[in-house]
Amino acid sequence: MERGDLLTFMPEGYCVKCKAKKEIIDGVEETMKNGRKAIKGKCPTCGTVMFKILGGKAATVTSAASASEPVKPAATK
């Protein structure tokens, strides 16, 4: 496969109405209130809304002041 070819990634989720794993169509990536990423879309068979939580959290911005202070090791005698 050449680098110029586009791959369409179809995430797979569980449809509670069909009680089966199916590909999520019209999936849109969202960020939940707790910072985790998820995909929301529809079931290709029945049209029920499907929701799949993805691994990992969204990147958070750290304070520059706390990151700039080095941690000093404890003095030993």
Image (cartoon, rainbow, N blue to C red):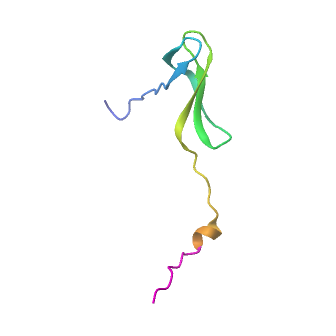
Residue displayed at 58% across by 72% down:
68
Residue 32: % across, % down? 65, 38
Q: Describe residue 19's horizontal placement relative to residue 65 as left or right.
A: left
Between 52 and 16, the residue placed more toward the observer is: 16
Residue displayed at 62% across by 60% down:
62
Marks counted in the figure total: 0
Q: Determine the main secondary structure of the stretch shown in magenta.
A: loop
Between 48 and 73, the residue placed more toward the observer is: 73
- Which residue appears farthest toward the front when viewing the image? 77
Residue 29: % across, % down? 59, 33
Q: Quadrant of the C terminus?
A: bottom left
- Which residue appears farthest toward the right when viewing the image? 33
**Residue 75 located within the stretch drawn in magenta:** yes
Residue 23: % across, % down? 49, 19
Between 68 and 55, the residue placed more toward the observer is: 55
Against 62, residue 68 (above or below) is below
Residue 8: % across, % down? 45, 26
Against 4, residue 77 (above or below) is below
**Residue 76 located within the stretch drawn in magenta:** yes
Q: Describe residue 31's horizontal placement relative to residue 1 as left or right.
A: right
Residue displayed at 42% across by 29% down:
6
Q: Quadrant of the N terminus?
A: top left
- Which residue appears farthest toward the bottom when viewing the image? 77
Task: Give the magenta range.
Answer: 69-77
Q: Residue 49 is drawn in which quadrant?
A: top right
